[in-house]
Amino acid sequence: MILAGKFVVGAITFAITVVAFYFALVDRPAKPTVEEWKAKAGAACERNFGSAQVSLHTALLQVAPLVKSPPPAGKQDPALTNVLHSIDQIASAFRVLNADIREIPVPEEASKADIDALLSANQDVAATFSAISTTLVNYQVGQVSTGDLQKTTSTMQKLTATTLPSWIAGARRLGLTPCLVIMGGDLPSTPSSAPPATPAPPSAEPTPEPTPSPSGTGLTEPEQALVAMLSTNVMIDCDPARDEETDEIVAAVNCTAARNGPSKRPLVMRFADKDALNRWIRTRSVGLPDRGCGNGDSTGDWQHDKVDVGILTCKPGNDDNYLALWTFPDDNIGVIAEAADRKTIWKWWTKNAYLVTRPVPSPTAFSPAEQALVGRLKTSVLKSCDPRPDEENDGVIAAVNCTATRTGPAKRPLVMRFSSDDSLKTWLDGHTKGLSDAGCSNGDSAAAWNHEGTVKGTLVCKPGDDDNYLAIWTFDSERIAVIAEAADRGTIRAWWAKNANLIVG
């Protein structure tokens, strides 16, 4: 009986151990992935940089003239105090970001060297801004001379020439584009080279004012396309704002408001995609309630003719101006306008907010199906479309030729919409015979393509009939196909890589 009892107890203990091991195995957290790490690190950037009152670009613009022509030493100066606040805030944001990123579990397949390099660059940026801040404090209390203060120039030169480019490159390697919002534009020249002679007052969202020139002079094609979408009843005399253009902002212009209200020329930007636009407005709306701009600082949806359009954010700038920032997600457009007070900018905004226009094709030029097709195309990629009824048949309900906004194609790309999934498949089969799925970077190919991890359709790369090289790709859910061609595979491949996702939404 004793042996039997021991056997039973042993069996029960073994069973409990097995069950405990099973639940421990089941409850074990899944290993972190690279995408999860990127999402958490990007959120950390938005959290730490989104609340910054000024961008890094603006902070440097504030420092440059004060270092070149400083106020008397040993006395507190309001401008220096304002700069100190900006610099300390940026240094603190980088230090906290480092701590937040270190707490994120690192996936096994992640590039630990790139992550360590970013952390090191974060620390370098924070240390540099802290060093500048310390010098400014010591200057105000009379512990350093004007000459010592102006030695900060070399620190800024290293920051703009080495430290920041290293940090930007590290963030891009890791796919952390939300981190780059702190930049706010291209880096300014340091005082030793070309300091701003009469810098504009800083604002939370800078709206740089370039040297006036005739409207449209010197505009790039993306900038021209953006200006063409703006109502001349609201915006006139637009000039390029190149220092606002980045990988995520494909075009930016400052325009004169046709009606009085804004104290500076509003800034209008076209983003590469809807995600980039959303990141931009989201990081500038952190902590704001949704109570309507007529009632105070706010962020929330805005409407035109009782139809939701985008997000409207209203908040103070840091130069006593008041900002209105609003978006047009269907067109990937964001706008910043400011006035001396909230009442003024709010009154102007209510009458001028809907400043985007969409040219309506003449009914004699386009059929309803062709109009619908053109309406689905991003004007940042394709513009000035014309009907191609000769390409239409029972399977193809609409076809248009459009001009590529960016250089690359040797001919105007052809866009077609099919009547059914089967019609699209039959047409595509005729272009894929005998092709491998090796991928277009490796030569002639027919394979699935995706955008941001979502499969969109099929991409075909092959020679054309007139010594040009073709890229043919489909948007299966839309039953749309596109044909573009260039003189060689490298040219069309490079253009396609930047312009493939040309459908709105």
Image: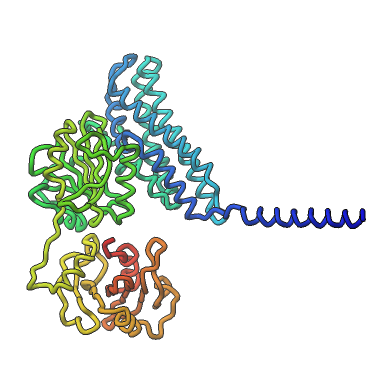
Residue at screen point 50% across, 49% down = 114
Q: Looking at the image, is 25 positioned above or below residue 321?
A: below
- Left or right relative to 382: residue 142: right
Residue 386 location (% of width, % of height): 14, 72
Tell which of 111 and 315 is nearer to you: 315
Q: Quadrant of the C terminus?
A: bottom left
Q: How is the image coloured?
A: rainbow
Tell which of 286 and 108 is nearer to you: 286
Residue 211 visible in the picture: no
Residue 247 location (% of width, % of height): 32, 53
- Left or right relative to 368: residue 40: right
Residue 460 visible in the picture: yes
Tell which of 329 and 442 is nearer to you: 329
Q: Quadrant of the N terminus?
A: bottom right
Residue 36 location (% of width, % of height): 48, 52
Q: Looking at the image, is 80 positioned above or below residue 357?
A: above
Residue at screen point 17% across, 45% down = 254
Residue at screen point 18% across, 55% down = 226
Residue 149 location (% of width, % of height): 36, 23
Q: Looking at the image, is 268 positioned above or below residue 398?
A: above
Snapshot quadrant of residue 392 = bottom left
Snapshot quadrant of residue 332 = bottom left
Total marks in image: 0
Q: Looking at the image, is 426 positioned above or below residue 264?
A: below
The single residue placed furthest to the front in the displayed view is 1
Tell which of 156 and 93 is nearer to you: 93
- Left or right relative to 98: residue 71: left
